[in-house]
Image (cartoon, rainbow, N blue to C red):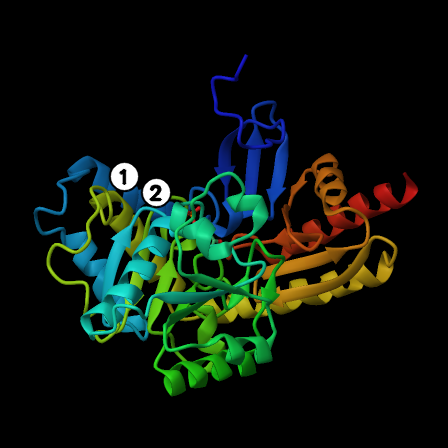
Amino acid sequence: MIPTLLPTYSRAPFSFVKGEGSWLIEADGRRFLDLGAGIAVNALGHAHPALVQALCDQAGALWHTSNLYQIPKQQELADKLTAHTFADTVFFTNSGTEACELAVKMARKYWYDKGQPDKTDIITFSGSFHGRSSAGIAAAGSEKMTKGFGPLLPGFVHLEFGDHDALTAAITENTAAILIEPVQGEGGIRPVPDQCLKGLRDLCDEYDILLIFDEVQCGVARTGKLFAHEWSGITPDIMMVAKGIGGGFPIGAVLATEDAASGMTLGTHGSTYGGNPLGCAVGCAVLDHVTAPGFMEDVNRKAGLMRQKLEGLVATHPDVFEAVRGSGLMLGVKCKLPNGDLVQAGYEQLILTVPAADNVIRLLPSLTIEDSEIAQAIDRLDAAAAALAVA
Ligand SMILES: *Cc1c(COP(=O)(O)O)cnc(C)c1O
């Protein structure tokens, strides 16, 4: 008999009932050190007082009105996001995959309105992840995500991650956009070097192509800048955001320049819940917090500390771990043993990590993780690796 929950997930047998900062408390009272943070969602940890306050204040005042009316918190969040980024305009969604949908529509409509209706192709890269909608899976293109779900949305050109020559060769007069994660998340914490992001920008300018960044996982201070592409000094035309911006409340966004957004005129897109008062109130609180003086410096300091300690861990367990990679507090450890075994061994030590492709375990702690918690995380990973090495 089919379970009453559609069985699409493989779930660990924990039922968490409470969260406090970097900690998740199981129904039986055990305290787990959470280095997954809901897959880079709980940017400020669990139950951050400022976010609880923002949500409760809004919940007591007004939950939902629809986009038939002005939504002051939505306007406020758009103003904040545009003030802090390359973008001139923002559309709010409920998730990353919905942001992907709009990014694709926006890019195609841009060229359509410019009198180039055949300029619809979007170049993407192996190992990428852009959500589970029809556009999202077609964009990623992996067999694992697309098999059996055809016919797929056409117009995606899939290239090997990091193959510069293939990229230049693949561009045609019908290339509308290049879509890329500045740091691949699901693909195994693979940063795109700054030089390559600059090269992509140049290529897009040269051939009249829109550059779309998917910062759903790497954005919102995760890498020690508000958005990961800021390290490279270049900017995209369109950017997808979700996960961390809501700190655990479902909200996403598409940010764009005025030019790139020019096709999205009255009536061309919409969402019932997108930009609702609850999500936007929390989003404002998250953004205020991560852009406050000193916050990003602290993320970078802790990222350096954690990376250094992880390098030490890899050196201690050369048969278990291969290398550390990533950016800021978006870290991956490539494993020599199966990454699933490491995640499992971590559970035994009451530490939560997240598997990714390429045999990597992801460490995506709350950006508010304390130095003492980083030390505990390393101790627990050390014990997990030691237990595996013995087994
Ligand atoms: C999680 C993720 C998405 C999809 O976001 P959902 O909110 O799960 O729809 C898209 N792109 C990237 C890079 C992601 O990490």
Residue 193 coordinates in the image, percent (x, y): 58, 77
Q: Residues within 10 Å of mark 1 (few under 14, many from 20)?
A: some
Label 2, on which residue? 52
Question: Cβ of disc 2 within 8 Å of ligand 1?
Answer: no
Q: Left or right of 306: which side holds 297?
A: left
In space, the residues marked 1 and 2 are separated at their CA atoms by 6 Å
Identity of the residue furthest to the left in this view: 69
Image quadrant in which you'd find residue 237? bottom left
Residue 86 coordinates in the image, percent (x, y): 32, 75
Residue 349 coordinates in the image, percent (x, y): 73, 39
Q: Left or right of 186: which side holds 6?
A: left
Q: Residues within 10 Å of mark 2 (few under 14, many from 20)?
A: some
Judge whether 309 appears above or below 349 on screen.
below
Judge whether 53 appears above or below 305 on screen.
above
Please, what secondary structure does the residue beneath circle 2 have? Answer: helix
Instruction: Tell which of 49 and 358 is nearer to you.
Output: 358
Label 2 amino acid?
Val
Give the residue displayed 71% in from the left and 67% down from the top.
308
Instruction: Tell which of 227 and 138 is nearer to you.
Output: 138
Residue 298 coordinates in the image, percent (x, y): 52, 67
